[in-house]
Amino acid sequence: MKKEPPYLVTFILILSCEKVDKVCNCSNPLEDLPWLKEIKASFTIVLVRYSIFQAAYNKQTVFYSLMNDPLCNSFQQINLYDCSGNNINTFNSTDSGL
């Protein structure tokens, strides 16, 4: 079997990548969505570390925040928000599967 040159394989891989669409019709949701920017700003006054995550839930883009400070070992309520900032679901520690 003949080996393909590495540059040819790399070129084929680059061409096979899908173009990433804009999320919620913006290129930077953390700065472009006012409600998400407000949540982000509220974390700067808290002493523990929080992160904002983007995910897919029921075939739609959602955002949620989660405390990820290694000094805190606890579970908080997780609220899923759609692109408009509407709360579409809430998960608690008592929900099955969590």
Image: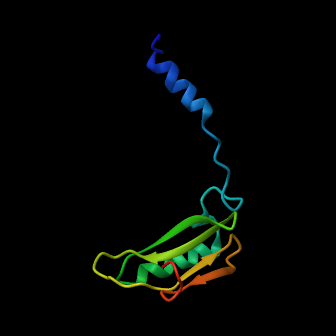
Nearest the eye: 44 or 8: 8
Nearest the eye: 89 or 97: 97
Q: Position of residue 63 (x, y in %)?
A: 59, 70
Q: Which residue appears at 61% of the width and 77% of the height?
A: 80
Q: What is the residue that sits farthest to the left in this orientation?
A: 71
Splitting the image into 4 quarters, where does residue 60 fall?
bottom right
Q: Which residue appears at 52% of the width and 67% of the height?
A: 53
Query: Is 15 left, or right, of 96 in this rendering?
Result: right
In the image, residue 73 above or below residue 5: below
Q: Which residue appears at 64% of the width and 69% of the height?
A: 33
Q: Position of residue 22 (x, y in %)?
A: 67, 54
Q: What is the residue that sits farthest to the bottom in this orientation?
A: 94
In the image, residue 83 above or below residue 26: below
Question: Across the whole image, how many numbered discs are drawn on residues?
Answer: 0
Q: Position of residue 16 (x, y in %)?
A: 61, 33
Q: Which residue appears at 69% of the width and 69% of the height?
A: 83
Q: Which colour scheme is used?
A: rainbow
Q: Where is residue 85 in the image (x, y as percent from the top left)?
A: 67, 77
Nearest the eye: 37 or 76: 76
Query: Is 43 left, or right, of 37 in this rendering?
Result: left
Splitting the image into 4 quarters, where does residue 23 fall?
bottom right
